[in-house]
């Protein structure tokens, strides 16, 4: 059995078809939207009053139709006619569900949701219920910006809820899983703050290299064996400090800071090297001054003295300021490479990891060699990659052959 579906009386002389929501062959349920029409005020979705299979569609988008224009035919053996909220089962012809589409009902519906087909399509695509949106357009019309604001607010509230849930979960987990609290020292809190600032504000790049220190190590160990003074062994760090000072003389851009307005690079006068020191889990960075004017023995004694001061927590402000660049040596502990965080206002930091013996090819054979891993983090606003590579190459060259220190 076929039944024609007509445009109901929606209180307008003529409306335009703006959307056809079904195709021939589709199964249509009662009250399922089948077309959208637009009048001069707003648009409305016309639902089907019967269920059945779409057999024919007589309209296309853009067509102008009037009340009772036939728009499609549905095929069904056993028609079910339904008028929502009213008993219409007895009505079985073209004049269906008039009450549902009465002018008052139409006005009520459009008063609730007043939007153009584009907006309706957008809402459908985004799966948004138009009745949830606060209209700000003329005559309560929902505008695109109303949808955007609705989405924005919803995303915000979802984010807020997720954060709240996470916070609750976090607190619950902490309560359930923790056994104790470790209270951070004032120094740890302020170091943490500075590290965070530097990490967030400085565009870091870390350049890695491996230095063959076989010859230097032989010399260092020989020196330590033969020296008269029992205390103060010269560690590899002392040579690294001296060589870094030499490199800073050759590459002054590494001995600088960026002006506050970030428009100038200020070159430092002196060459002072900061040494990151681990004192009972507290990080302190005492600064060794004027290293370019000091020899290896002097540097070693000065480091020993300032380390003692650091461990006794007697460092003064002048001991920890005006560094040109910092060295963080984890080689006494272990690890291959790491990315150190720049100690602002300095513009670079040298990370040193544990030297290990590895086979090195000399074009004839593999020679067991002592290789020292270096990690140079630099501020990319001040130093470019080529400068960093040259700087580290220079350090590599001098540590590999200490004679270059006199050049
Ligand atoms: N590779 C191999 N061996 C190394 C080495 C390296 N990179 N660095 C040091 N060593 C050796 C030393 O030569 C020494 O061996 P010898 O007795 O045979 O000479 C031994 O390790 C112990 O050295 P050390 O650590 O006592 O002395 P140092 O001069 O090398 O370093 C100091 C001094 C204060 C830097 C170090 O004790 C320290 O505190 N390191 C931790 C730094 C740190 O925490 N950095 C992280 C900062 S960011 O969180």
Image (tube, rainbow, N blue to C red):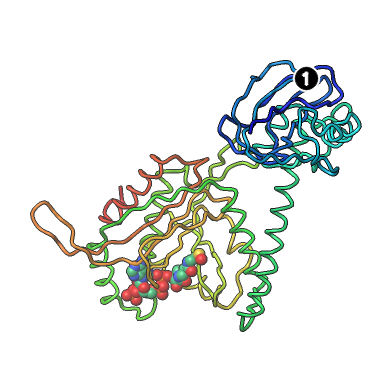
- Secondary structure found at label 1: strand
Task: Report which quarter residue 54 is drawn in.
Answer: top right
Corner quadrant of residue 352: bottom left
Q: Among all residues in the image, which is located at the extreme left?
A: 364
- Whether residue 302 is visible here, answered yes or no, is no
**Placement of 23 over or under 373, stated as above or below:** above
Q: In the image shown, does 387 or 75 lie closer to the viewer? A: 75
Report if residue 105 is visible in the image: yes
Q: Residue furthest bottom?
A: 179
Tell me where residue 348 appears, x and y as whole percent: 48, 50
Q: How many marks?
A: 1
Residue 321 percent location from the top left of the image = 59, 58
Q: Which of the 4 quarters of the picture holds residue 374?
A: bottom left
The foreground one among 162 and 90 is 90
Q: Residue at x 79, y 41 (%)?
A: 89
Residue 239: x and y in percent read 36, 62
Q: Residue at x 61, y 84 (%)?
A: 179
Residue located beneath label 1 in the image: 15
Residue 4, compared with residue 301, is above or below; it is above
The answer to whether the beta carbon of the residue marked 1 is less than 8 Å from any atom of ligand 1 is: no
202 with respect to 166 (left or right): left
Front in this rendered view, residue 195 or 407: 195
For residue 198, side relative to residue 255 (left or right): right
What is the quadrant of the N terminus in the image? top right
> Image height check: is 390 above or below 208?
above
**Which residue, as the protein is rendered here, is positioned at the far right?**
104
Q: Quadrant of ligand 1?
A: bottom left
Q: Residues within 10 Å of mark 1 (few under 14, many from 20)?
A: many
For residue 4, above or below residue 63 = below
């Amino acid at each position: 059995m076929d039944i024609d579906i007509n445009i109901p009386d929606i209180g307008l002389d003529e409306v335009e078809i703006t959307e056809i929501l079904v195709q021939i062959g589709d199964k249509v349920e009662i009250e399922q939207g089948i077309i959208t029409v637009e009048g001069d005020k707003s648009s409305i979705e016309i639902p089907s009053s019967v269920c059945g299979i779409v057999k024919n569609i007589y309209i296309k988008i853009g067509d102008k139709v009037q009340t009772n224009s036939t728009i499609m035919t549905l095929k069904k053996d056993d028609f079910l006619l339904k008028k929502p909220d009213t008993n219409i089962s007895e009505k079985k012809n073209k004049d269906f569900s008039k009450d549902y589409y009465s002018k008052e009902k139409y006005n009520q519906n459009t008063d609730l949701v007043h939007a153009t087909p584009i907006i309706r399509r957008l809402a459908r695509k985004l799966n948004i219920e138009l009745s949830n949106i606060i209209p700000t357009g003329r005559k309560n019309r929902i505008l695109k910006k109303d949808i955007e604001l609705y989405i924005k607010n919803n995303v915000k509230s979802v984010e807020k809820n997720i954060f709240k849930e996470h916070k609750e979960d976090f607190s619950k987990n902490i309560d359930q899983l923790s056994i104790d609290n470790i209270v951070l020292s004032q120094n740890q809190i302020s170091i943490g703050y500075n590290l965070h600032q530097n990490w967030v504000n400085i565009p870091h790049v870390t350049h890695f290299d491996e230095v063959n220190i076989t010859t230097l190590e032989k010399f260092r160990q020989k020196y330590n064996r033969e020296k008269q003074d029992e205390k103060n062994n010269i560690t590899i760090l002392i040579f690294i400090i001296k060589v870094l000072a030499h490199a800073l003389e050759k590459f002054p851009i590494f001995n600088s800071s960026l002006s506050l307005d970030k428009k100038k690079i200020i070159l430092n006068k002196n060459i002072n090297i900061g040494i990151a020191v681990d004192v009972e889990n507290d990080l302190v960075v005492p600064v060794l001054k004027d290293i370019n004017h000091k020899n290896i023995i002097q540097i070693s004694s000065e480091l020993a003295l300032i380390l003692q001061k650091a461990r006794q927590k007697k460092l003064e402000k002048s001991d920890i300021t005006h560094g040109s660049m910092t060295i963080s040596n984890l080689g006494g502990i272990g690890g291959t490479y790491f990315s150190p965080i720049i100690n602002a206002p300095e513009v670079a930091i040298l990370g040193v990891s544990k030297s290990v013996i590895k086979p090195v090819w000399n074009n004839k054979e593999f020679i067991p060699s002592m290789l020292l891993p270096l990690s140079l983090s630099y501020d990319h606003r001040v130093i470019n990659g080529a400068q960093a590579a040259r700087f580290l190459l220079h350090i590599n060259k001098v540590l590999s052959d200490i004679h270059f220190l006199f050049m």
